[in-house]
Every structure is written in structure tokens, then in C-alpha cells.
Amino acid sequence: MKIRVGLLLLALLSGCDDSQTTQKGFAGLGDTAIAYAPVVPGRVFSFPADHGVHEGFRIEWWYVTANLKDAQGRDFGVQWTLFRSALDAAPAASGWRNQTIWLGHAAVTSATAHHAAERYARGGVGQAGVQATPFDAWIDDWQFSTKAAGADPLADMQLKAAGARFRYDLRLTSSRPLVLQGDQGFSQKSEQGQASYYYSQPFFQASGELEIDGQRYTVSGPAWLDREWSSQPLTANQTGWDWFSLHLGTGEHVMLYRMRHKDGAPYLTGTWIDAQGQATTLNAGEISLTPQDTVEVAGRSMPVRWSISIPGKQLDITTRALNPNAWMDLRIPYWEGPVQLSGSHGGNGYLEMTGY
């Protein structure tokens, strides 16, 4: 079982070393998944049900990032993720017969510090899980749960987690609609058709407290929720990705990802979200995404400054990492942290880089 669970976690986590990417694509996500439910175009999303678990699919996650400031203008970043992985495609059994593995990641970043923690749990025994109504996602005492009594369970949320050198307790609110990524929520990841179901809430406003290295701060700022589920989201040729969620100072939001290949050009796509929440898919020909400065982090060369150009939207910016050393030094490591924008638009956002 330990070997099986270890392979499963490789299929979940954002990052792995080169030895794991040789045959099966990045983190095993190129493994075939014939027994599991396929991701196909034309799904009709239903809320609040789709905030919950999707049995039959192999991989699923609830992922929150926040770009925060305190009263003195100091910048911070917060990340919270809950992963669900199915050991088989059958409906989940009760108790210790349950074939679900849960994994939590949480982190806090400042200009001078970055701390991350992880939690593991087996399904069926109450230690971790997700329910759609009222919405609650948890692993141990880490929680992302609704405070709203109305029709939209994501209108008013509480987000909290803690590690050895950090903790945070935030309130997230939004009155804006959810955004379906890709083709009405069908988010393609390769030319061969690998895909996930994917929606976001990029309009959260967060406020609350965080503590890092014994210092407590009252903070506020924009936050972003990503929800994805799939069974085989990558090809065996894809070695990792570079993913951006950006809050522009003019009110728009941008999501971009670049799936890197062992051979050939990366698969590049994105979404432009206007201030009212209207989403427009961006294809590779509309985007220029180029790594600039690199730094040595944990023995790896990481591109922590990028240039991004979307001429059709008059966007020409540079992203710079708040803390270049935002290395998630977990069992399977990767880079993830807040970025700041300059150029045609100001603002901030988050960058995740895997497979380096």
C-alpha cells in the first residue's frame, strides 16, 4: 500500500524530480486512466453540486491563493490546496474500505520568508473530505468552508491553516459570478485532447490575520479559487507547467498556463476575464510568455521573472517574484509564490512552476 500511495501522490502533487517524468509524463499525470470517467466537451456545470466531490474521476483539487498587504504596505502571499485522489474508479466505500487519498498543502510567503506544510489523510474516516452543501473542505483543522446562508455558498468563506512557523485565518467574500475556463469549463491541456474540467472564482476579496515567524499581521487583498477535476490531464511527453493567475490593477484578471514538452513547443493557452466576469479564451497565437531572469533555488534554475504580452488586450507586462526562494520544500517539491506586475498594467498574482 505504501508504494501504491506514493505513486498516487506523484499523480497529485505539483512537482517531481526528473526521474519520475521519464516514461509517464510529469508526475505520472500522463498515465492512462481507461477505467475512470473521461473529460469530454459539453458538460453542463451545476452549482453548488460541482463544488463537491466528483466520484469516478481520478484526480481533483480545491486551490486558493491570496495576494495580501498589511497596513504598512508589506506584501504577503497565502496558498491553500486540498487534493483528492481515487485509488480506483468505483464509488467510494465507507470507513477504512474507502479508496480515497486526501492531501493538503498550505504556505505563507513574504519578501524575506517562505514556509510550507503538508497533511495526508485516508478517506472514509472523517479526517478529510469535501461536502457541497453547506460547502466545507477540510483536512484535520485546515478548512475552507462557507459562512454564507444564501444560494451561493462561495459568497462568504473562511480559510485557515497552520504550520510550524506560520498560520492564517482569512475571510473571503465575492458577489461576482464564477468563471468557466477553456471551452465552457472544458480546459484542454494538449493537442492530443487531454483535458480537465476547470472553473475559477478570481474575484474573492480576502481579509484577516496571518502569522509568520512569530509576527502577526492584519492583512487584506485579492484571492483566487481554482477548481479542477480530471482522470488523465497530461500526455506522457509533458514534463511540467508554468501557471499564472493575475489580478490586474484595472480590474481584469488573467489565467495563463504553459505545458512544457520533452520534445516540441509548449502547449500554451489562457483566459482573459474582464471586470464584469466575462471570459475570453486566449490561444497560443495571442500570447507571448517568455522566461527572463533565473535564480538558483534548491539546486535548480528557476525563472522568477517573466515577460507576458497579449497584444489584442494591450497587455505588456513583467512579472517578478515577491520572494524568489518560494520553494515548496515538501515531500515532492515545486515552486509557488506571489508575483508583482509592472509595465502596461500594475497588479499582482501567483505563479506555480513544476517539473524543473
Image (cartoon, helix red, strand yellow):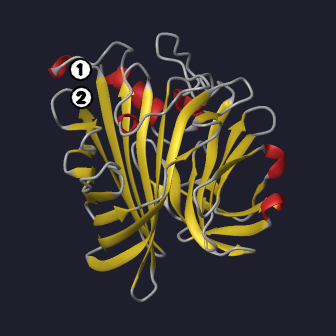
Q: Quadrant of residue 79?
A: bottom left
Q: Residue furthest top?
A: 35
Q: Assign the N terminus to one quadrant of the image.
A: top left
Q: Residue furthest front?
A: 151
Q: Considering depth in this image, is 275 or 144 the residue closer to the camera? A: 275
Q: Are marks 2 and 1 in contact (CB under 8 Å)?
A: yes
Name the residue tied to disc 2: 123
At a point 33% along the width and 44% down the height, the residue shown is 104
Query: Vertically, is 24 above or below 324?
Result: above
Q: Position of residue 3 (x, y in %)?
A: 36, 22
At a point 34% along the width and 72% down the height, the residue shown is 207
Amino acid, disc 2: Gly
**For marks 2 and 1 on the same chain, the one whose residue lies earlier in the sequence:** 1
Amino acid, disc 1: Asn
Q: Is residue 207 left or right of residue 184?
A: left
Cα gap from disc 2 to disc 1, whole angstroms: 6 Å
Q: Position of residue 203 (x, y in %)?
A: 49, 61
Q: Is residue 339 visible?
A: no
Q: Is residue 265 left or right of residue 22?
A: right
Q: Position of residue 347 (x, y in %)?
A: 60, 73
Number of residues whose C-alpha sits closer than 10 Å to that of mark 1, classed few (under 14), some (14–19) or many (20 or more): some
Q: Quadrant of residue 94?
A: top left
Instruction: Give the mark count.
Output: 2
Name the residue tied to disc 1: 98
Query: Vertically, is 34 above or below 184?
Result: above
- As helix, strand or loop, the secondary structure at mark 1 comes to loop
Q: Considering depth in this image, is 6 or 89 the residue closer to the camera? A: 89
Q: Considering depth in this image, is 68 or 54 the residue closer to the camera? A: 54
Number of residues whose C-alpha sits closer than 10 Å to that of mark 2, classed few (under 14), some (14–19) or many (20 or more): many
